[in-house]
Amino acid sequence: MNKQEIAQILKDIGLLLELIEDQPFKSRAYYNGARIVEQVEDDLQELVAENKLVKLRGIGKALAEKITELVVTGKSSYYEELKAQIPSGVLDLLRVPGLGPKKVRVLYQELQITNLRQLEYACKENRLVTLPGFGEKTQEKVLKGIDFLKTFQGHYYYAEAYSLALEVLELLRDNPGVEKADLAGSLRRSKEIVKDLDFVACGNNPGQIIADFCQWSRIREVIAQGESKASVLWDTGIQIDLRAVEPSLYPFVLHHFTGSKEHNTALRHLAKSRGYKLNEYGLFSGEERVSCASETELFRALDLNYIPPELRENRGEIEAAEQGPLPNLVEAKDIQGVFHVHSLYSDGKNSLEELIVETIRKGYSYLGISDHSQSAFYARGLKAADISRQQEEMEKLREKYPQIKIFAGIEADIKPDGALDYPDDILQSFDFVIASVHSHFKMTEEAMTARIVKAMSHPAVTMLGHPTGRILLAREGYPVNMAQVLETAQENQVIMELNASPARLDLDWRYLKEAKERGILISINPDAHRLEELDDIKYGVAVARKGWLTKEDVFNCYSVTYVDKYLKAKK
């Protein structure tokens, strides 16, 4: 191990010490030691062999021992011990402009933030504002820094990718040589996380479509370019793949590149069983291509009803399409009101009145406010006095805005033993209660399941919030037996939340179909902490469609009269 490598490990030790404890003199000793090692002219091997390290100014006995171990073994047990105390993702936080070791230590120790996605989510829930050494401006700078870093990451939230995809699609369709253009790939199937964007276009001159595409100013790099396809790196860092074909091939190419791979394989087997050959170039009967003007006609040629892109995962959609029309999947226009909205009373950015006015402007007929409960001290959770004050304000606002129904709710923490965060008399004061897990994620599956099941069995609980606790690209959901949770929801008529925040999209679409089959209602909730996040509902709708949900399966697709009666009956 050379001087530079040893110096770097000493610097890393200094950094780790800053992250672990507030004793700057210890960190400084290792930073100084790194500088000395870099500048020393004598051979380190000789200094160690002759036990002369301690004679170097600034190198004490403890530091000399660490350097000796590095020189002799190429390793440092102290360094490994320190690394074991800090999750590796914490070091990534230091890449955010404006975040030094002191601030990262506060984030880790106070909020248990261990990676960039957790940090982003904490910013969007205004968790940094009240931390020592932070504030609103620092939080805004951190968010901007994260946006910069995300350019160079390889995975994207559905919401991030979809926003960009609309821009690309508009540019493609503006090309006079393009007859049709559509989104394909995992984003068209509404997967919650995507790695790249896929598009399909058609026109009389596919090669020119590709050539025009590769000249766009926002392309950072052309990875590959051919007559019918191109792969480029967009200026945001995401890869975009484009296929261009003649119009007669368009339905086949669009279907093929929408996927999924499993769906395509199953459909090819079905086609073969019926005497056809299916691939991206067409549906063939012998050597002759079957003419299909659309994907609908392609499915019809195979005696299938149309399968929406969101369902193409080989999870029963082909069998269902053989038997009859698939369900009319829920649409954003079906949503009639919103629940799970945070205000200034806890960690939201807007007043009750601002939220009400915006909800009216969006055409909703009801709004359910649910701030955090008292255990969520980091989110300024509501004490009993806060609840009374908030409900008094709501009553006045109901008189001022009679055109919308305002429901008073709470997002009550589920304690480790399964108890809720307030006594029953306080819980009874709310129109609805969302029960959520916000702490103690590392329980066993059995213990976590028992905890959630107990909470859901409480008669005051209306909904289970973000049921698995996952934060996409930040942390896995906590271990829980979801079959048992769904059974409990069915037995106790607890509504399951589909949290529409792009960072959650929880309940996962893979469980939604089972919930539907059990007759469990789903509420698509934005978990909004600011006005613009009310629009996140559309991402929840995309996931709901992927989970086979119709508007009849979604609680907040029902009228205000129905919802009001339901909540009163539940209470």
Image: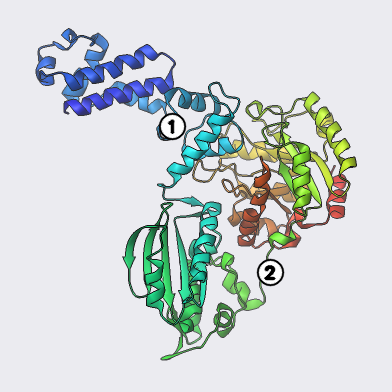
**SS state under label 1:** helix
Q: Nearer the viewer, residue 449 or 561?
A: 561
The mark total stands at 2
Mark closest to the chain's N terminus, 2 or 1:
1
Q: What label does residue 407 carry, if any?
A: none
**Considering the image in quadrants, where does the N terminus appear?**
top left
At 51% from the left and 88% from the top, the residue drawn is: 291
Kind of residue indicated by mark 1: Val
Q: Position of residue 501 (x, y in %)?
A: 61, 47
Residue 206 figure quarter: bottom left
Kind of residue indicated by mark 2: Pro
Q: Position of residue 491 (x, y in %)?
A: 76, 49
For the rendered model, the colour scheme is: rainbow
At 70% from the left and 31% from the top, the residue drawn is: 346
Q: How many residues crowd around disc 1 within 10 Å: few (fewer than 14), some, or many (20 or more)?
A: many
As drawn, 222 above or below 377: below
Residue highlighted by disc 2: 327
Q: Nearer the viewer, residue 77 or 150?
A: 150
As drawn, 17 above or below 492: above
Q: Position of residue 231 (x, y in %)?
A: 37, 64
Residue 383 figure quarter: top right
**SS state under label 2:** loop
Q: Residue 500 vs residue 153: left or right?
A: right
Distance of label 2 from label 1 (alpha carbons): 45 Å
Q: What label does residue 90 carry, if any?
A: 1
As drawn, 184 above or below 378: below
Q: From the viewer's perspective, is the residue at label 2 or at label 1 nearer?
A: 1
